[in-house]
Image (tube, grey):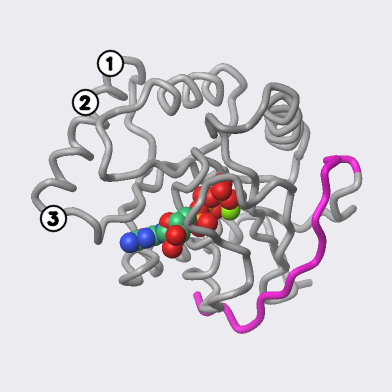
Amino acid sequence: MEIKKAIFISSNIDVDKCPQTDKPEYAFIGRSNVGKSSLINMLTGQKKLALTSSSPGKTTLINHFLVNDKWYLVDLPGYGYASRDKTQKGKIQKIINDYILKREQMLNLFLLIDSRLEPQPIDIKFMEFLGENEVPFAIVFTKADKLGSEKTKNNIKSYLDTIKEQWEEIPQYFITSSEKKIGKEEILKYISSINNKVITNK
Ligand code: GTP
Ligand code: MG
């Protein structure tokens, strides 16, 4: 699939104020700084569509981007940013949970995980939360350019082994680098396969 057009539509704090539409959407979640906004830019081929930063906590709202006039990519705030105060943390958690649990047209959530790290309890717990609530998701291992490919592979294997302890089946997963544009085709193909099931051109 080719992305011909991707435009910013809105930023919302309240899921009920998000675009009132039945177009399918695909959202990105994961720890702050894992590379959610960068991945949206890589997928759309627009460097500055979603705002990114080298310091965590950049995205704080639900951001909708309309793609090819037919479906949305949604950039969410990250979780687990230690420097946020308690009130701010609570607010961000509410935005994330409300969106994930209420937004019916969100057909797949991409859960981003930093490929440089050992399995992180916060990510494993988040996956459990998704399972308990039957949220459809796929895993995206990010920043695959940062370590050598051997080290990246070992980290991913160790993540998958941890996941296997709790899940009967390993979720669909992708390995990406927004820096080196790795994984773009695979993710777009996956989105396209879901779109094809729900979008009719009539
Ligand atoms: P929050 O909005 O704070 O939750 O962060 P985020 O998950 O949206 O991360 P963002 O896309 O802003 O990226 C965080 C930092 O990681 C930026 O400095 C990016 O340039 C860098 N980054 C993101 N993806 C990659 C990647 O694939 N490779 C490398 N080397 N750096 C990356
Ligand atoms: Mg962001």
Which numbered circle lies on residue 60?
none
Range of the magenta residues? 1-16
Question: Element under label 3?
Answer: helix
Magenta residue check for 2: yes
Quadrant showing the C terminus? bottom right
Q: Which of the two residues, 190 or 39, is positioned nearer the viewer here? A: 39
Quarter of the image holding residue 113? top left
Which numbered circle lies on residue 161?
2
Which residue in the structure is indicated by mark 1? 165
Which residue in the structure is indicated by mark 3? 149
Q: Residues at badges 1 and 2 in contact (C-beta under 8 Å)?
A: yes
Question: Element under label 2?
Answer: helix
Distance between mark 3 and mark 2 Cα atoms:
18 Å
Task: State the residue at coordinates (31%, 67%).
Answer: 182
In the image, taking residue 52 as reference, residue 13 lies left or right, namely right
Residue 32 to residue 122: above or below: below
Task: State the residue at coordinates (55%, 36%).
Answer: 136
Q: Which of the two residues, 33 or 183, is positioned nearer the viewer here? A: 33
Mark 1: which amino acid? Answer: Glu
Magenta residue check for 85: no
